[in-house]
């Protein structure tokens, strides 16, 4: 049986991790929506995710780093979930 993984953005990069907690899954989805809106020019509040950990990993909230990763094409919003 394939496990469903979610993409997570940290200061170390983008990773596919198992997120079994439904509250964390929802928060991660909300985080990615805010990142996407931020990159589209919306003054989305990424600060609300500061120090938030999902599956033990701290989410990246540094605007400059997110912009750099976005411009480098590293962030993809088509696939939040992956199968392994």
Image (spheres, grey):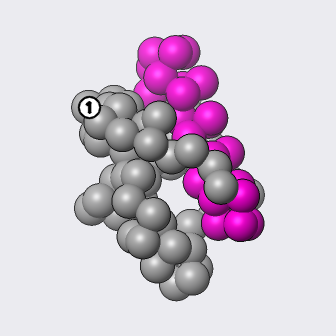
Query: Seen in the image, is 3 located left or right of residue 78?
Result: left
Assign the magenta stretch its main secondary structure.
Answer: helix
Q: Residues within 10 Å of mark 1 (few under 14, many from 20)?
A: few
Q: Is residue 19 visible?
A: yes
Q: Is residue 17 visible?
A: no
Looking at the picture, tell me which residue is in the foreground, 15 or 27. Answer: 27
Query: Seen in the image, is 27 located left or right of residue 51?
Result: right
Res 76 quadrant in image: bottom right
Q: Vertical placement of 78 versus 75: above or below?
A: above
Q: Vertical placement of 34 versus 30: above or below?
A: below
The residue sitting at 73% across, 66% down in the picture is 40
Res 25 quadrant in image: top right
Q: Is residue 2 magenta?
A: no
Query: Seen in the image, is 71 located left or right of residue 59?
Result: right
SS at mark 1 in the image: loop
The residue sitting at 46% across, 16% down in the picture is 21
The residue sitting at 27% across, 61% down in the picture is 12
Looking at the picture, tell me which residue is in the foreground, 82 or 47. Answer: 47
- Expressed as whole percent of the image width and height from the top left, the position of residue 83 reads 58, 44
Please provide the residue range marked out in magenta.
Answer: 18-42
The residue sitting at 38% across, 59% down in the picture is 62
Q: Vertical placement of 20 versus 73: above or below?
A: above
- Expressed as whole percent of the image width and height from the top left, the position of residue 78 reads 73, 58
Q: Which residue is mark 1?
A: 56
């Amino acid at each position: 049986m394939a496990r469903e993984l979610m993409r997570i953005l940290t200061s170390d990069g983008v990773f596919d991790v198992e997120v079994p907690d439904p509250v964390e899954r929802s928060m991660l989805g909300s985080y990615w929506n805010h990142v996407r809106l931020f990159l589209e020019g919306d003054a989305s509040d990424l600060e609300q995710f500061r120090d938030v950990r999902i599956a033990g990993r701290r989410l990246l909230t540094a605007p400059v780093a997110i912009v750099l990763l976005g411009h480098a094409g590293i962030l993809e919003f088509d696939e939040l979930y992956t199968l392994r």
